[in-house]
Image (cartoon, rainbow, N blue to C red):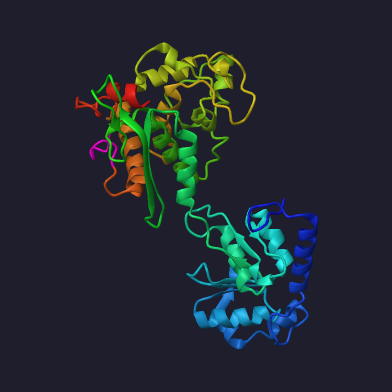
Amino acid sequence: MARGHRGGVRTPRQYFFFMLILSIVQLVPAAHGKTYGTKEEKIANQPPALKTSCKNFLGRPLQSLCETDAAYNLCLAYLKEGNWDYCVRSGSPEKVAKRGTAPQAHEELTKLHCTSFVKIGKVSAYSYSCPDTDFLLSTAHITCLAYQNGGSGIACLPPPDLLTTMADKIDANLQGFPVGYAYVIRNKAGKSVARAWGLARKPPDTPAPVPMDVNTHFSIASVSKNITAAALLRLMHEKGVNSKTARLVDYVPKEWVVPPSAKGAVLGTVTLYSMLKHRSGFRCNNMKVEVTYDNLKVCFERSIALLDQGSDCNGQKLTTEDSIGCYDNFNYAFMRVVIPIMKGYTLPKSLDASSGYAKQYMAYVQENVFNRMDKHASPLSSGAIVGYMSTNKELGHDASDTGRSVA
């Protein structure tokens, strides 16, 4: 539904005048040069410099990728005469132009979830705010700029601050639920938002409450599952693996045996996607053993409670795609072998399987997750986070201490 510049819903009468003015805008010629009729005429009569200084954009006719500002401006002038469809300046995503009318721009930008801000009677006030979905210039915002630069009569507002928007949503969903939390969000350009809320520790763990801070040390515990998920999703993207259809049985050591039973048949349908959401049916936590390589193999080969696939911990079937199943540490522990095998790692015969796969897993996570976040980030050595088996018994470092007070 269309919305006005103050966030209200436009009345039918306002919307009628809005579309009427947009229709008038498309009748106003953008330039006074000669406009050619057919595509062939437009290509044949393009300025020589446009032909020599620009090349077809994505191999499409009437679309040009230009290497210099002068060539881009020449393309832009020819576009505004109605003879070209698209102009792009190489290396400058904000220098892009698309031929089109204001109603065409409105229709496409609405589909891209841009918000329109309209003041009836002022054509110059037709403006759009588009979501910034990839931290830099989003596809929606670039599309808006293209219509704006192409002379459609619309204007583009700066993209909203995505980092602040994300932080606001995190706070809205978390405040009041845990004892405390802290986080930092950073984008590719180096901009960051850091926030903390609540307590790091409270009595009886400490005589007086200790406020949470972004520099507070605490056990990472099962937050490591998010890191594992990020590493796996990145690797699947690199390898072109479909996250929803990739099967566990295709990424385990060859010596692991699929049980010759009905459970074995079900095991062959378990996807990595279902494991990330704890919907696989594995109930290996019930074995009440440590999550070691040998116990992973036992869990796989016995297919513990695998017939509970798609159910919660009480055996009730999950009803929606977004529902989280029965939480089981083994779902993510399997990724210790899945990630190295998907990456193409072959375990040398002289190397112990447990340490061999674990080292490859940690190396991939370090290189593709931690190193990409910050030059100082490291799973354990930086001191920013500590694992379950920390030897530092000071408050804030021991797993049991922080598990009670912060979880």
Q: Position of residue 177 (x, y in %)?
A: 45, 28
From the viewer's perspective, tell me whether residue 351 is left or right of residue 155: left
Please tell me which residue lies in front, 23 or 77.
Answer: 23
Q: Position of residue 227 (x, y in %)?
A: 39, 37
Residue 30, magenta (yes or no): no
Q: Residue at x 32, y 36 (%)?
A: 362
Quarter-of-image position of residue 188: bottom left
From the viewer's perspective, tell me whether residue 266 is left or right of residue 332: right
Q: Position of residue 91 (x, y in %)?
A: 47, 69
Q: Which secondary structure dominates the residues rendered in magenta?
A: loop
Quarter-of-image position of residue 110: bottom right
Q: Position of residue 364 (x, y in %)?
A: 35, 41
Please tell me which residue lies in front, 44 or 75.
Answer: 75
Q: Residue at x 61, y 22 (%)?
A: 318
Can the viewer see residue 349 in this picture?
no
From the viewer's perspective, tell me whether residue 42 is left or right of residue 308: right
Residue 379, magenta (yes or no): yes
* Circle count: 0
Question: Which residues lie in the magenta part?
Answer: 378-385
Can the viewer see residue 278 in this picture?
yes
Quarter-of-image position of residue 407: top left
